[in-house]
Image: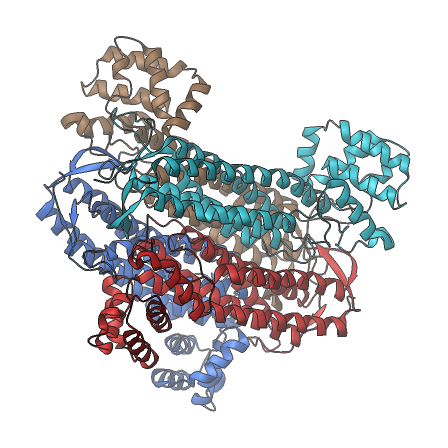
Chain colours: A brown, B blue, C red, D cyan
Amino acid sequence: MLRFEAALAEAEAMADLVPSDSAKAIGEVCHNFKPDWRALAEGLARDGVVVPALVRQLRDAVGEPHDGFVHWGATSQDVIDTALMLRLKGVLAIYLRRLDGLLFALGELRARDGAVSLMAHTRMQQALPFTAADKIDTWAAPLKRHRERLRVLGPQLLAIQLGGPVGTRTEFAAKGDVVANELARLLDLPAASPWHSQRDRIAEFGSFLSLVSGTLGKIGQDVALMAQNEVGSICLPSGGGSSAMAHKSNPVAAEILVTLARFNAGLLGTLHQAQLHENERSGAAWTLEWMVLPQMAIATAAGLEKARELIVSASFVASR
Amino acid sequence: MLRFEAALAEAEAMADLVPSDSAKAIGEVCHNFKPDWRALAEGLARDGVVVPALVRQLRDAVGEPHDGFVHWGATSQDVIDTALMLRLKGVLAIYLRRLDGLLFALGELRARDGAVSLMAHTRMQQALPFTAADKIDTWAAPLKRHRERLRVLGPQLLAIQLGGPVGTRTEFAAKGDVVANELARLLDLPAASPWHSQRDRIAEFGSFLSLVSGTLGKIGQDVALMAQNEVGSICLPSGGGSSAMAHKSNPVAAEILVTLARFNAGLLGTLHQAQLHENERSGAAWTLEWMVLPQMAIATAAGLEKARELIVSASFVASR
Amino acid sequence: MLRFEAALAEAEAMADLVPSDSAKAIGEVCHNFKPDWRALAEGLARDGVVVPALVRQLRDAVGEPHDGFVHWGATSQDVIDTALMLRLKGVLAIYLRRLDGLLFALGELRARDGAVSLMAHTRMQQALPFTAADKIDTWAAPLKRHRERLRVLGPQLLAIQLGGPVGTRTEFAAKGDVVANELARLLDLPAASPWHSQRDRIAEFGSFLSLVSGTLGKIGQDVALMAQNEVGSICLPSGGGSSAMAHKSNPVAAEILVTLARFNAGLLGTLHQAQLHENERSGAAWTLEWMVLPQMAIATAAGLEKARELIVSASFVASR
Amino acid sequence: MLRFEAALAEAEAMADLVPSDSAKAIGEVCHNFKPDWRALAEGLARDGVVVPALVRQLRDAVGEPHDGFVHWGATSQDVIDTALMLRLKGVLAIYLRRLDGLLFALGELRARDGAVSLMAHTRMQQALPFTAADKIDTWAAPLKRHRERLRVLGPQLLAIQLGGPVGTRTEFAAKGDVVANELARLLDLPAASPWHSQRDRIAEFGSFLSLVSGTLGKIGQDVALMAQNEVGSICLPSGGGSSAMAHKSNPVAAEILVTLARFNAGLLGTLHQAQLHENERSGAAWTLEWMVLPQMAIATAAGLEKARELIVSASFVASR
């Protein structure tokens, strides 16, 4: 949010809407700002969004004569939504790295164990023999598609939001698009027309998250089934201890992948409910998004890391 | 499914896996086939999938000496999943047409009423004035993105499925890819490696459906709010009669858009649960997909048509 | 709905709000009424609820001088909601019978196979030995609780709805409660104050449905796991044939129980969204309820029957 | 969890399964125990459940010769599930208190503003006049039913879980029920047969939570609609400030009730997915429950408090 406010002032200075000195003063304050967290929390509870309290603190810190130019022409949603995109940009990079890491681990496993003979199962029954390479390929193929989806998704998702109070950029007179383009350049995000009441980007991103965790959950389900004592076609390191049965070794990482997949699938249904914004801004739908999206993003990242740990520790065992 | 079986035999004949005469005989039977529906229903209940009963009937109809080549090398899921794609291809064309129709109607409305002055509302409160054109633009923008999504989605989604019993194409000896490519050509669908246990395409398509209905639900919500007697900034034709209050005119089409959006959002969460296929085929997850996806597809199509009807009948009224 | 309209007129005659002759004429028409289905469908599409069109047809059929007393003082929601309760009363009786049937089948299975030694599994791994009776008891216990829940639920759920246009019974002057109590007596449902915008009864009923199908899904999951070739601790009759692998016998009924459980769980989340009625009646939320509840009710009934078939056909096999 | 371990040892001492001195030593350690949190976290990550690491620490703290009697005969799920019930007992008391508080506030509002004339709205349109008392009654009636549901739910939900590794109490020889009953008495919870793989109690509790938040969401939706500037039939204290529009006062508390209702409704669908435990314990389903239930419980409690704040601050304004 501080990066947004600093860049906004700078963009507005370039468009001659804000004095250069004011933009510079705002930028410096934002760079070193230490918020009064308690006052932010109280403001959030009162206003339903943290921005009014934050802007108030920033204006106090900037002081006269520049304080009037803090947050100039913008609205809470411009800050929150653009700040979300700044953070998601880093999150997407993590996903890409973890997808690569998981695919690499699957490649290593395939190189080592690919020729192991396995029994394929359809509808929970033995079907016909195939190999570990065949199995691994069914895990890797959707992950490769997700990597491609991520490459396409990034530029569509990561757009700045700048609309002003009702999304028309009227506050910037004729210079709205100039400010928006400059803001985008400064924040290194694509420019976009105001989209604050159009949540398709967010809902589509949530879908991506659930696609990834769904694929991981399928891998986890397969591993848990193959690791059954009676099947024994995959071997996991000991771990997953029991408080009552010393002989047990539970497939904890595999279970967690199933859990995260079902968790994200359910949350996706809720996130899509949040598409129904009333008119130019919905406090209710927006808050719902806040409650759902972060959990989904974290669950996806955790699943990718957990899946890699699972794969690097697993070895296939020829079916009897 | 009949188109699949006919094309499969033909593709296999081209690959010298099936005699040409057999392929021709199978093609003719498929072209004119009248199933015993009751026996199909019984087969579905017994086998959990209709294909074994259908293949049995087809083999009887084809007769000796060709009957052994019906469904040769394929499995139930090859038929069902590819037949789904054949139908979805037509469904996607309907969506494209209806998106175009709705965007056209919005354009007409904008041309006629765009200059009408409205009050924008944020968080259910009056914010600042803007125009009907501003409002309409927030409805049209995501629809345009959906049209673009549809163009990208089609070629990724509409792939043939041909894998044989466990998805390895082993039954076709070295000619699996030849048969698959020829099958794809004959059915005018993209070729793809077997994906029967990888449901990301289906889950992503469901997400598209919920994105569309979510946008429509937002339009419906806006219209219902603007059509409130106390607001009166949109005028709908009379209709939506009440059995008790003759003076009422309920915004039925707008309400339905809200309903369909919430319906599809919820179903999307369930569809994504169906990503967790156990091993090489999950009867449970696959059946869940069958119960959810068709309703979502229909709800989306109905919403697009209902939205167009709503828009062509609406007119904006300047805010007081 | 016809039963409601007839009983309403009769109750109103008892309260001297409607002439006895009119009530009698209305009752006779309702008893033999053949609707114009096409006109009902058109009315439903136009009004968002079928009642205005139905009342129009009834009034035409009743004719002068009694037609003005058809649906007197009531609103669409009184008809729809009370008619739902009349049907649910029969549905609950089906559930009770099927729960009894399933519990009986489990008792028979326990009597025959209860002493069979099984391996218990926790977290998908072998734990310690126990018996088929121990396993069956974990299936039966929640079903017995569901039977008890059903007994408690019935009288709370199955209440008449009579409120008039805005739920205040004002239309009946001082005789609203008299009419409501008489209506309840005639329809053999409990009386209740108007509840049309309070959907907790419906949402709670949906929860019951998902509790039942959840228990059945757990049974199905257990059976599918035990029926794995490698485990083989439950034996199912052959069936569940494959179009490609003659040796297979798929646990179709068990899979379906899993499917129905996940289907109902997801729909429950959507049904609970429909609790948010705006003001005195929500077209959007009410329609959502119509789209979700019937599927859930059917899925539950189907699951109970499928579960009984599964149990009567299964036999336990001692773990190796 | 510490209370459980202390009471278990004491109950086992009463049943002569554990020496009295050991039970006393265990009880004292549990009373003053300071865990090594980092080691607990590592244990949770490794074992998928915190109990093995906790028991190890407890045994170390108890030391010889009593350490072997810590957690004697019990399994992780006995600890976790019973500890959940101990906490939920307090949570239910909070709900009851907050329901009472909210109903009291509604009663006060009704006493003061009940006679205010309002316009009722059905399907987002003006219907007929009624009063603030009529409106408040539709809010209070389901809350009163929830209070009754809570009274019935408590004794059914809050049962101890004691089953041992596979839920058969075999470890306690013939004294399983004696230990269980004594444990229940010591923890002041109802006794129950082992239910660890039967999650209907939890799923039903989740449904209760969503019923409560659904009712509150309906109140919030009504308030937000009535607080629209154009309607103005409810007056809220100023607050809900905007960063861009000084004149605005957003109905933040009302919006949050809508948010929490949609949040809980969606999570309920996911919680019900967690009913499908595989065999005698499902790591995947159990973990899913852990991720969903606490959020729902907190959202419900927050909603009740937020609703009370909203009601005490609101006043009705006669419809124009």
Residue displayed at 32% across by 48% down: C279
Residue displayed at 72% across by 57% down: C121
Question: Is residue D189 among what the camera can see?
Answer: yes
Q: Quadrant of the N terminus of chain A?
A: top left
Pinpoint residue A16: horizontal percent, then vertical percent: 18, 18
- C124 or B260, nearer to the observer: B260
Question: Is residue B166 among what the camera can see?
Answer: no
Q: In this picture, is B217 found above or below A199?
A: below
Q: Residue furthest bottom?
A: B64
- B95 or C209, nearer to the observer: C209
Pinpoint residue B238: horizontal percent, then vertical percent: 16, 58
Image position of D2 (left or right of A305): right
- A96 or A26, nearer to the observer: A26
Displayed quadrant of residue B256: bottom left
Pinpoint residue A65: horizontal percent, then vertical percent: 25, 8
Residue displayed at 18% across by 56% down: B247
Q: Residue furthest top?
A: A64
Q: Quadrant of the C terminus of chain A?
A: bottom right
Q: Residue furthest front?
A: C16
Residue displayed at 24% across by 30% down: A165
Displayed quadrant of residue D18: top right
Image position of C141 (left or right of B122): right
Pinpoint residue A211: horizontal percent, then vertical percent: 46, 50
Q: In this picture, is B120 found above or below C54?
A: above
- D135 or D305, nearer to the observer: D135
Displayed quadrant of residue A119: bottom right
Q: In this picture, is D271 found above or below B55?
A: above
